[in-house]
C-alpha cells in the first residue's frame, strides 16, 4: 500500500519532503509549498533533482562520502536542519510558496495551463468529428 502522499504533503505540520524526485512527487511537493531533500534513484529523477536544487533552489541534495560511497547520518541531519531551521531553508520555503502560487494561477480559469489544456480538448473534439 502507498501512503496518501498528497494528503500528507498538504498537512501544515510538514516542513520538508525527502523525495526521489519523480515528476509526480515533485509536482505534489511544489503544489503544497513543501521544500525537498532530493534523493534521486534513476532515470529522469537526477535531472529533476538538479533542476530543483540548482535552478529553482527549493531542494537540497546530499553530499556522498567518496570513501564510503554512502550518505552518512551527519549529512542527513545537515539537510534536515537546512530545510527546517536555517535561513537557507526559510528562503527555500518562500521560493516554493511562490512556485505554488504561480502554479495555482496557471491552473485556474484563464491561466496558461488551463487555456492550453482547453485548446487541446477543442482540437481533439475538432479532429474526432466525422
Image (spheres, grey):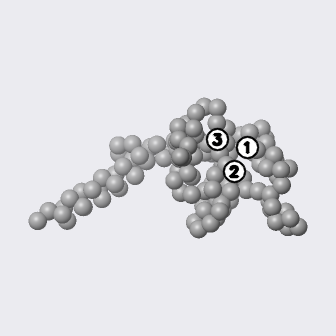
* Residue 12 found in image quarter: top right
Q: Is residue 31 visible?
A: yes
Work out whether mark 1 precedes mark 3 in sequence or the reverse, and give the earlier one. 1
Residue at screen point 77% across, 38% down:
85
Q: Residue furthest top?
A: 12
Secondary structure of the residue carrying numbered label 3: helix
> Are there few (<14), some (14-19), or many (20+) residues within 10 Å of tag 2?
many
Q: Is residue 95 left or right of residue 23?
A: right
Neighbour class for label 3 at 10 Å: few (<14), some, many (≥20)? some
Q: Secondary structure at mark 1?
A: helix
Residue placed furthest toward the left: 130
- Percent position (x, y) of residue 108? 39, 42
Q: Secondary structure at mark 2?
A: strand
* For residue 49, side relative to residue 101 (left or right): right
- Closer to the observer: label 3 or label 2? 2
In the rendered structure, which disc, 1 or 2, sits on the residue that comes first in sequence? 2
> Which sits in the foreground, 59 or 67?
67
Q: Is residue 30 above or below residue 45?
A: above
Residue at image position (35%, 55%) is: 116
The residue pinned by badge 2 equals 37
Question: What is the C-alpha distance between the residues marked 1 and 2?
Answer: 8 Å
Q: CA distance from mark 1 to mark 3?
A: 11 Å
Identify the residue at horizontal 24%, vertical 57% (top origin).
122
- Can you identify the residue that label 1 sits on? 83
Q: State if disc 2 and disc 1 touch (CB < 8 Å).
A: yes
CB-based contact (under 8 Å), mark 3 and mark 2:
no
**Which quadrant holds the C terminus?**
bottom left
Amino acid at each position: 500500500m502507498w501512503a496518501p502522499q498528497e494528503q500528507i504533503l498538504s498537512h501544515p505540520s510538514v516542513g520538508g519532503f525527502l523525495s526521489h524526485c519523480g515528476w509526480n512527487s515533485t509536482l505534489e511537493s511544489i503544489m503544497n509549498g513543501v521544500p525537498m531533500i532530493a534523493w534521486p534513484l534513476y532515470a529522469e529523477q537526477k535531472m529533476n533533482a538538479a533542476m530543483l536544487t540548482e535552478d529553482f533552489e527549493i531542494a537540497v541534495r546530499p553530499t556522498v562520502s567518496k570513501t564510503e560511497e554512502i550518505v552518512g547520518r551527519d549529512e542527513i541531519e545537515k539537510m534536515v536542519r537546512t530545510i527546517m531551521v536555517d535561513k537557507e531553508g526559510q528562503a527555500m520555503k518562500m521560493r516554493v510558496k511562490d512556485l505554488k502560487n504561480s502554479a495555482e494561477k496557471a491552473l485556474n480559469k484563464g491561466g496558461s495551463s488551463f487555456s492550453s489544456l482547453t485548446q487541446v480538448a477543442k482540437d481533439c473534439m475538432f479532429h474526432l468529428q466525422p
